[in-house]
Amino acid sequence: MTLFRPCIDLHEGKVKQIVGGTLSDTAGGLKTNFTSEHGASHYAEQYRSDRLVGGHVIKLGPGNDAAAREALAAYPGGLQLGGGITPENAAFWLEAGASHVIATSCLFDTGGRFQEERLDALVKAVGRERLVLDLSCRRRGDTWIVAMNRWQTLTDLPLTREALHSLSGACAELLIHAADVEGRCEGIDLELVRFLGKHAQVPTTYAGGAKSMEDLALVSEESGGRVDLAIGSALDIFGGKLIRYADCVAWNRRESGKSG
C-alpha cells in the first residue's frame, strides 16, 4: 500500500521548503517556498501525535545539527535523519533518536564516482536494517542519474534496474527525490514512480512535485502500491494551498485499516 510520508527539511537551522534544484553553495539562485515560524520539534511532535512513521529529517547544509537533534528528541525512533551522514557519524545520529540514517554524498568521491567501500563501511557501522540510501536523481535523456552535493553534482551512477537491485541488498529502504520537480508543485514524475514500483526491492519513498491528494492515489496505482509518497511544499502546514495535512493523515489511517 502507498502511504504519505512526512518530512522536515532544515536549512540554516530553520524548517523550510526549498525548490530542490536551486540549492547550492551560493545563495544567489536559491528559491524558498516557505520558512516556518515553528521549530523542527513542532513538526516532529505533530507527526508523533498523528502516529505517522517513516518520515525524514534532512539537513540541507551546515547549521542544522541542533534543530535536527530537537526533532529527533521530540519523536525518538519515529524519524529518519539525512544530510552529511558518514560512516564516522552515523551511529551518533541513531543514538540521538533517528530510526535510520539516510546516506547520499558520502557514497561518492568529490568527482561523483561511486565508492563501494564507503557503502560497506556504512553497513558495518550501523547495519543495513538502519540504513536508507538516498538515490535522488536528475533526468538526463532517457535515464535518471543519481545526484549528490545538494543535487548539484551528477554522479557516475545511473538509476537502472541493476543499480536498484544491487543497492537494495545493502539497505532497509530507498528515498528518491526527483530533483528536477522537487518543490515545484507541478506534478510528480510518473515515469520514475512506475520504474521504482517495478524494480525497487525494498520499501521506497518517492518525493517531488506532488500537487494534490490525487497524487497519492496515482502513486499507489502506478507503482502497484509499492512506493510511498513524501509531500512537502504543497502541504498547508508548510504554507501550501494544494493539500491538507489532515487529509494525508486520514489517507494513511484508511490505507492502514485496509491492510489490517
Image (cartoon, rainbow, N blue to C red):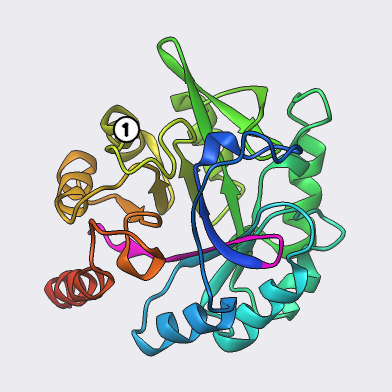
**Front residue of 105 and 163:** 105
Rendered position, 34 above or below 121 = below
* Quarter of the rendering occupied by the C terminus: bottom left
Instruction: Label 1, secondary structure: give it.
Output: loop
Horizontal arrangement in the rendering, residue 204 relative to residue 75 (left or right): left
Residue 227 percent location from the top left of the image: 32, 49
In the rendered image, the residue lying farthest to the front is: 28
Rendered position, 181 above or below 169 = above
Residue under the image location 59 percent in, 73 percent down: 99
In reply to whether residue 2 is colored magenta, the answer given is yes
**Image mark count:** 1
How crowded pointer 1 is (Cα within 10 Å; few <14, some 14-19, many 20+) is rated as many
Residue 20 percent location from the top left of the image: 53, 41
Residue 148 percent location from the top left of the image: 67, 35
In the rendered image, the residue lying farthest to the right is: 88
Horizontal arrangement in the rendering, residue 219 relative to residue 174 (left or right): left
Horizontal arrangement in the rendering, residue 127 relative to residue 250 (left or right): right
Q: Which range of residues does the magenta coloring cover?
A: 1-13
Identify the amino acid type marked 1: Asp
Residue under the image location 30 percent in, 34 percent down: 198
In reply to whether residue 15 is colored magenta, the answer given is no
Residue under the image location 78 percent in, 69 percent down: 91
Q: In which quarter of the image is residue 90?
A: bottom right
Residue 48 percent location from the top left of the image: 44, 85
- Which residue is labeled 1 in the image? 189
Horizontal arrangement in the rendering, residue 225 relative to residue 169 (left or right): left
* Quarter of the rendering occupied by the N terminus: bottom left
Residue under the image location 70 percent in, 41 percent down: 27
